[in-house]
Image (tube, rainbow, N blue to C red):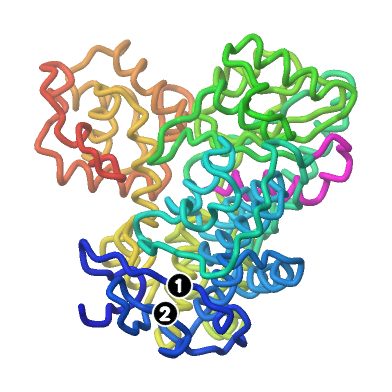
Amino acid sequence: MPGRPDGPRAWPDGWRPSIRASPAIASAKVDYNPQPSDNIKDAGGAPLWPLRPFGPLRPALRAEARLTLGQHSGTLLEELAQLVQEHPHHERIALLRMGVLYRSGRRSEALSVYEETRARLAADLGLDPGPDLRRAQEMILLADGMPEEWPRRLFGARWRETVTVSAERSGHRTTAGAAPPVPFVPPSAAGFTGREAELHRILELSQGARHSVSAVAIVGAAGHGKTALALEWARRHHGRYPGGLEIVDLQGYSARRVLSPTEVLRTLLTWRGMSPERIPHGMAELTSLYHSELAGSPSLLVLDNAVSAQQALALLPPAPGSLALVTSRNRLSNLLMTAGVGMIQLGPLPPVDAHQLLRHVVGADRTEAEPEATAELAALCGHSPLALRIAAANMVMHPRCRIADHAQALRTDNRLGCLAITGDRGSSVGSSLALSVRRLGHEAQVLFRALGSLSAPVADRSALERLTGLPRARVSDLLDLLFAEHLVHVDGAGRFHLDELTWQYARLLAMDDTHTATGIRTGQPEKAHQSSSPRGGL
């Protein structure tokens, strides 16, 4: 028999344990510790304790056993709802809650749990759901597998259990799309601070929805809190839309593939309870069907993380009184040419709001004890909500370190290296900026790297002409591409500037880059752009 693995993510390759659910586990208390008599065994029948006897995994084990035994009652749902409140970012618990709803014939509510979890992870941590949750959502959307097959078919590769049920299955079956859509109220981002002027402006624009305004675009640089603002407004005002609230991640700036309008429309129709076999495939037919679904019932639609105006335009609700909130790092200039679209340009937080965000996450006792260091740290973060949250999370994980120590590290060390979640380098300001740079073409990427060679984050076009040897017209065209992605800001009179953290990122690329600006003219291959890493090799 193999030795006991260190937790459920460390199973030896090629060995798949078999967990046989028993009534002893299903009826156990929340503080239950596995025992041999509870029939948890390996593939050879020997006793096995694969789960650590502490943390939220204990009640999750119990809930999983009850679900496997077909005991998906209202009591189990209540327990899982309480667990979600206690552990709002624990994806395993959200996965089990989706399973209970799905097996109970409440398919639309199961999908709502996914969107609720996705919104909370994005707003609080700036993260996407893991592969298990994404796979579960996809299988439910496509009706890939009957409800009674949960949880066997909805665990990803990281959870390699195979479950056999020792009790009789319930035999419950659900017709796809039978349940009506159940909207959820998006959670408020932890420590959501400020933005009252922007929230009021969206309200002003939305009040004209019955006459002209059909969408409000919220645009800004990476990490400025566009998603959090859209979700906060939706949380406050979703009751004004009797047709319901729907939130879609378009995956425009993501390590995942960008969603096409066709895919999004199919998802939206599925959420409204339409069975997959009734949903057409052609874009024109999908649009017509979706418009008919919205007719006479004003709805609120959040189109998060759009990559372009074209992607968003195909999804705007046509019904009078409906409103779409579109978030993007792209300036979405083409939307301004479309009748009834308003625009919110989102910048960094004002210093007082940045201080309040740190106070909420780190604690008033620490920020009030070091007010000057807190102000310096906020400035070193560029007052960017994402950078502030990452810095605050690291301070919470190191309670014995002074805020002044963290500020000194940002001031003297690799600032972007410090602005990463400890133990998770993919959750960082640098990886977020990389997603923006990845969207650029080869020449624009090389020009962005050239900006890192400048002595300051402020320059004029003539400096870039001398640096690159390119004619003024070509430099202007490439700067326009960077401007469209909020990577540079134009100050007028031929001058431009970069946000401090964006410039720091360009400097890192310039130091690591083996190319020079002449790579634009010679068309040399760009190894970093060809990388398949989540950071885009940038």
Residue 417 in percent (x, y) is at: 29, 60
Report the residue marked by disc 1.
20
Which quadrant of the view contains residue 350? bottom right
Q: Is residue 59 above or below residue 275?
A: below
| Mark 2 residue crowding within 10 angstroms, few (<14) / some (14–19) / many (20+) | many
Report x, y in % for residue 502.
Answer: 37, 44
Evaluate if marks 1 and 2 touch, with contact meaning CB atoms under 8 Å apart: yes
In terms of depth relative to the viewer, which is nearer, 346 or 428? 428
Whether residue 32 is visible here, answered yes or no, is yes
* Residue sitting nearer the eye, 147 or 4: 147
> Of 315 and 489, which appears nearest the observer?
315
Task: Work out which quarter of the rendered image holds the N terminus and state it.
Answer: bottom left
Position of 229 compared to 370: left or right?
A: right
Q: CA distance from mark 1 to mark 2?
A: 6 Å
Q: Which mark is residue 505?
A: none
Tell me, yes or no, whether the highlighted magenta stretch contains residue 229.
Answer: yes
Mark 2, secondary structure of its residue:
strand
Question: Residue beneath label 2, please?
Answer: 40
Above or below residue 242? Residue 61 is: below
x then y, percent, for residue 528:
19, 37
Q: Which quadrant holds residue 72? A: bottom right
Question: In the image, residue 441 lies at what x, y percent?
Answer: 30, 23
What residue is shown at x 28% (from left), y 70% (from top)?
10
Determine if the magenta segment contains residue 33.
no
Q: Earlier in the sequence, mark 1 or mark 2?
A: 1
Q: Residue at x 55, y 26 (%)?
A: 263
Q: Left of 520 or right of it: where is 498?
A: right
Q: Which residues are magenta?
A: 224-244
Using residue 250 as the reference point, say whether residue 341 is left or right of it: right
Dot 1, how many residues are within 10 Å of its Cα: few (below 14), some (14-19), or many (20+)? many
- What is the three-letter code of the residue carrying label 2? Ile
Q: Residue at x 32, y 71 (%)?
A: 409
